[in-house]
């Protein structure tokens, strides 16, 4: 069935794109802009980042959690 093959291809393509465009670059994305998002109170952007990372699994969310913890530690020391 053509529609069934298309669905399978689509699922595979999405997985490849998520892996190559997002998962491999999560730490880099977080290190280059996360602190600025928080500093500028752009919580909706942080929420979008969370929604982007959520389907990628617990490692992605753990990286986001770690970035937030590091932000809190750095800002806490500055006080």
Image (spheres, rainbow, N blue to C red):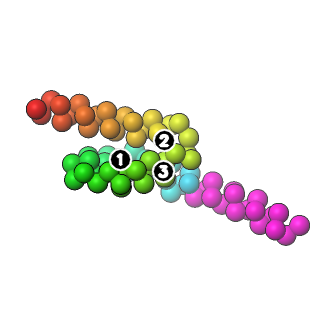
**Which one is earlier in the sequence, the residue at label 1 or at label 2?**
1
Q: Residue at x 10, y 32 (%)?
A: 79
Q: Is residue 70 left or right of residue 51?
A: left
Residue 42 at x, y percent in the picture: 29, 54
Which quarter of the picture shows residue 64?
A: top left
Q: Disc 1 versus disc 2: distance between alpha carbons? A: 10 Å
Asked if the magenta segment contains residue 68, the reply would be: no
Q: Residue at x 22, y 53 (%)?
A: 40
Q: Residue tagged by mark 1? A: 30
Q: Secondary structure at mark 1?
A: helix
Front: mark 3 or 2? 3
Q: Please tell me whether mark 1 or mark 3 is closer to you in this view.
A: 3
> Where residue 51 appears, x then y in whole percent?
48, 50
What residue span does the magenta drawing correspond to?
Answer: 1-17
In the rendering, which numbered label is found on residue 3? none
Mark 3–mark 2 Cα distance, whole angstroms, equals 11 Å
**Secondary structure beneath label 3:** helix
- Magenta stretch, main secondary structure class: helix
Which x, y percent locates residue 62? 45, 35
- Contact check, label 3 and label 2, Cβ < 8 Å: no
What is the quadrant of residue 67 in the picture?
A: top left
**Residue at label 2?**
60
Q: Is residue 68 above or below residue 17?
A: above
Compare marks 3 and 2 and give the one earlier in the sequence: 3
Which secondary structure, mark 2? helix
Pointer 3: residues within 10 angstroms few (<14), some, or many (20+)? Answer: few
Q: Tell me whether circle 1 and circle 2 mark residues in contact (CB < 8 Å).
A: no
Q: Is residue 32 visible?
A: no
Q: Which residue is mark 3?
A: 51
């Amino acid at each position: 069935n053509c529609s069934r093959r298309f669905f399978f291809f689509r699922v595979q393509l999405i997985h490849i794109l998520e892996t190559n465009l997002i998962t491999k670059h999560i730490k880099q994305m977080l290190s280059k802009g996360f602190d600025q998002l928080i500093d500028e109170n752009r919580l909706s952007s942080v929420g979008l980042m969370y929604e982007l990372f959520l389907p990628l699994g617990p490692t992605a969310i753990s990286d986001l959690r770690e970035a937030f913890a590091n932000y809190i530690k750095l800002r806490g020391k500055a006080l």
